[in-house]
Structure formats: C-alpha cells, structure tokens
Image (cartoon, grey):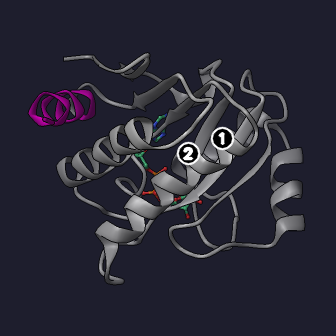
Amino acid sequence: MDQKRIGTKVIRLIRGDITEMDTDAIVNAANAQLVLGGGVAGAIRTKGGPSIQEECNRIGGTHVGGAVITGAGNLKARYVIHAVGPRMGEGDEDRKLENATRNSLLRATEKGLKSVAFPAISTGIFGFPKDRCARIMLNTVADFLKREETTLEDVVFCLWSEEDLQVFQKALEEME
Ligand code: AR6
C-alpha cells in the first residue's frame, strides 16, 4: 500500500531523496544542537546552501522531540522543519519520536502549509529500528490528521531505500 486517505487528506509513501521534494516543507532528521551533520542533514546542508545552518545557529537548539522551522535556502521546498529524534539507548525513545513527528506537524500547521515530506527520523545515525519508526510515525500522522485542525492535506514519507519503503508499506497496511 502506497497511500492512505484520511477524510480529505492523504498519507503517501515514496522512495527518493528528500532534498528533491517540492512539498511546502521537508523535515530534517536533526540533533538538539541543530548542527547539520551527515545523512539527511548533510544532504540538506550541501544542496540547500549555508543559509539553513545560519538560521539554525540563530535559533541555537531545541529539546529531543522538538521541532523548529527555517527557510530552505536553494531547495525546492519553502521551509525545512528540523525535528530532533531520539538517539537509540538514551531512553523513552518511542515517546520522543512521536513528539518529534507531532511537533513537525504543528510547525507546518502554524505556517499554514499544505504539504510536508518526512524522512524515517532517527533510523540512520541515531540507530532506531525501522519497523518501529514506521509504526510510530505513521500512527502519529494519522492521528493528527484525524483529530487536529490543520492546513495539511498531503503528508509524504520519502524513504531512502527500497527496503525502507517496504517496511513503511507493511506498517501502513497493518494500520487500522
Ligand atoms: N533522503 C531521504 N532519506 C534519507 C536521505 C535522503 N537524502 N539520506 C539518508 N536518508 P539520518 P538520524 C535516510 O542518519 O538517524 C545527522 O548527523 C536514512 O537512510 O539522516 O535521525 C544529524 O545532524 C535513514 O533511514 O538521521 C544528526 O546528528 C533516515 O534517512 C543525526 O545525523 C534518517 O537517517 C540524526 O540521525
């Protein structure tokens, strides 16, 4: 399954490079210091140019589970939402991932955005299991689209590998 309708809204799964997405915002898999390192963050830094890190420096940082929004420099998207997922082993990881997802959706809604693309937060350098990430992030988005007043109409998960896409497809099928 590659998409699920929730009322008039939709959750979609695609395989690709999130820095190529032309959704209103893309979500960065950030750290609490808001220093753009490797993985998704590195790709955003390279393709987006220096203005994104400069804006992050002015913000200074946020808590694990938090999300802040900046411009998107040279990227196709208008905004980057920097979501801080948990590092595996630090404790309370599931709740922190849920919060990072939900806070990203709140930031997008505050700006009146219609579309946002997420990566599989924490599943690279931070070591979070992919299937658990898929269940938590998909359920959090579905719950938000069902219950909250939001401008969001299109929430995309942009997965890096075929295997990651399949993990998310399975989790989407298993969602009630
Ligand atoms: N587009 C979509 N997904 C990607 C891309 C891409 N261009 N590149 C990697 N992925 P990661 P984390 C996938 O490591 O685990 C950085 O140093 C990747 O395969 O980007 O949250 C930050 O500055 C994986 O499934 O994020 C933080 O310090 C997923 O995106 C730290 O890493 C997330 O992998 C964050 O670690």
What is the x, y in percent for residue 157? 41, 31
Residue, x 18% and y 17% (percent of image)?
A: 1
Instruction: Write down the quadrant of residue 2 in the picture.
Output: top left
Q: Amino acid at mark 2?
A: Leu
What's the mark number on residue 12? Answer: none
Label 2 CA crowd tier, 10 Å (few <14, some 14–19, many 20+): many
Residue, x 83% and y 28% (percent of image)?
A: 74
Residue, x 55% and y 45% (percent of image)?
A: 105
Visible residue check, residue 29: no
Which residues fall within the magenta stretch? 164-176
Answer with left or right where residue 154 lies relative to residue 106: left
Residue wearing tag 1: 108
Visible residue check, residue 96: yes
Magenta stretch contains residue 153:
no
Circles 1 and 2, Cβ within 8 Å, touching? The answer is yes
Label 1 CA crowd tier, 10 Å (few <14, some 14–19, many 20+): many
Magenta stretch contains residue 171:
yes
Instruction: Write down the quadrant of residue 59 in the picture.
Output: bottom right
Answer with left or right where residue 71 lies relative to residue 173: right
What is the x, y in percent for residue 128? 29, 61
What is the x, y in percent for residue 162? 25, 25
What is the x, y in percent for residue 176? 13, 35
Q: Amino acid at mark 1?
A: Ala
Give the alpha-carbon distance from disc 1 to disc 2, as whole Å: 5 Å
Residue wearing tag 2: 105
Look at the numbered disc 1 and give the secondary structure of its residue: helix
